[in-house]
């Protein structure tokens, strides 16, 4: 079966558009100051990717799942994306105003493994729902993240 030229041209245009959007995507903002995040969050929660240098699965989650979510604008009213890079000397200010290493902060949530996704209330740093550790099924991971986002947002709003 031969495809019409217009279909092939349209498909190629979509492919290049998606490729250029993903290449232009800015990195996820670093988790640097929970007190500032609290001020700008409103009713939004923090979706925190715990990653580390040279972690191919962390890059996969960021590039294939979180950056496209961030670019879409669909989540702007529900969450703030943040990246917490452990084992590289990064420090942050926690919700109590204390400076703490990123690695120590991750250990507060019993999250030494990467990639891990935390769903946090920025007001107090409390976990809204259970964290997501690792990637068991890459082809379904986006679905699981979307499901977790909906659940965390409901909990942030005080809904069931």
Image (cartoon, rainbow, N blue to C red):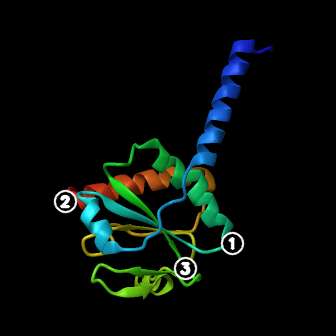
Residue 115, position as x, y percentages in the image: 56, 69
Q: Is residue 25 visible?
A: yes
47 or 90: nearer the eye?
90
- In the picture provided, is 11 more to the left or to the right than 45? right
> What residue is at 58 percent from the left and 59 percent from the top?
61
> What residue is at 60 percent from the left and 66 percent from the top?
58
Residue 8, position as x, y percentages in the image: 73, 20
Q: Is residue 155 visible?
A: no
Q: Mark 1 or mark 2, which is nearer to you?
A: 1
In the image, residue 55 above or below residue 45: below
Residue 54, numbered label: 1
Residue 23, position as x, y percentages in the image: 63, 47
Q: CA distance from mark 3 to mark 1?
A: 11 Å
Q: Earlier in the sequence, mark 1 or mark 2?
A: 1
Q: Name the residue at the left extreme.
A: 158
Q: Estimate how packed mark 2 is, as few (under 14), some (14 to 19) or many (20 or more) residues with alpha carbons within 10 Å.
A: few
> What residue is at 29 percent from the left and 73 percent from the top?
35
Residue 109, position as x, y percentages in the image: 41, 80
- In the picture provided, is 14 more to the left or to the right than 66? right
In the image, residue 153 above or below residue 132: above
97 or 115: nearer the eye?
97
| Residue labelled with disc 2 | 158
In the image, residue 32 above or below residue 7: below
Residue 37, numbered label: none
> What residue is at 37 percent from the left and 58 percent from the top?
80
Helix, strand or loop at label 2? It is: loop
Answer yes or no: do the residues labelled 2 and 3 have beta carbons within 8 Å? Answer: no
Helix, strand or loop at label 3? It is: loop
Q: CA distance from mark 2 to mark 3?
A: 31 Å
């Amino acid at each position: 079966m031969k495809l019409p030229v217009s279909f092939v041209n349209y498909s190629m245009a979509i492919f290049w558009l998606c490729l250029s959007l993903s290449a232009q995507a800015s990195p996820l903002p670093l988790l640097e100051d929970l007190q500032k995040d609290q001020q700008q969050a409103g009713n939004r929660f923090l979706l925190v990717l715990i990653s580390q240098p040279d972690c191919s699965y962390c890059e996969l989650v960021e590039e294939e799942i979180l950056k496209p979510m961030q670019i879409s604008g669909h989540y702007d009213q529900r969450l703030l994306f943040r990246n917490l890079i452990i084992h590289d000397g990064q420090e942050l200010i926690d919700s109590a105003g204390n400076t703490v290493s990123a690695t120590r902060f991750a250990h507060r949530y019993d999250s030494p493994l990467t990639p891990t996704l935390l769903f946090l209330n920025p007001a107090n740093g409390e976990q809204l729902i259970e964290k997501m550790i690792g990637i068991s099924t890459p082809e379904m991971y986006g679905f699981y993240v979307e499901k977790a986002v909906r659940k965390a947002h409901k909990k942030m709003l005080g809904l069931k």
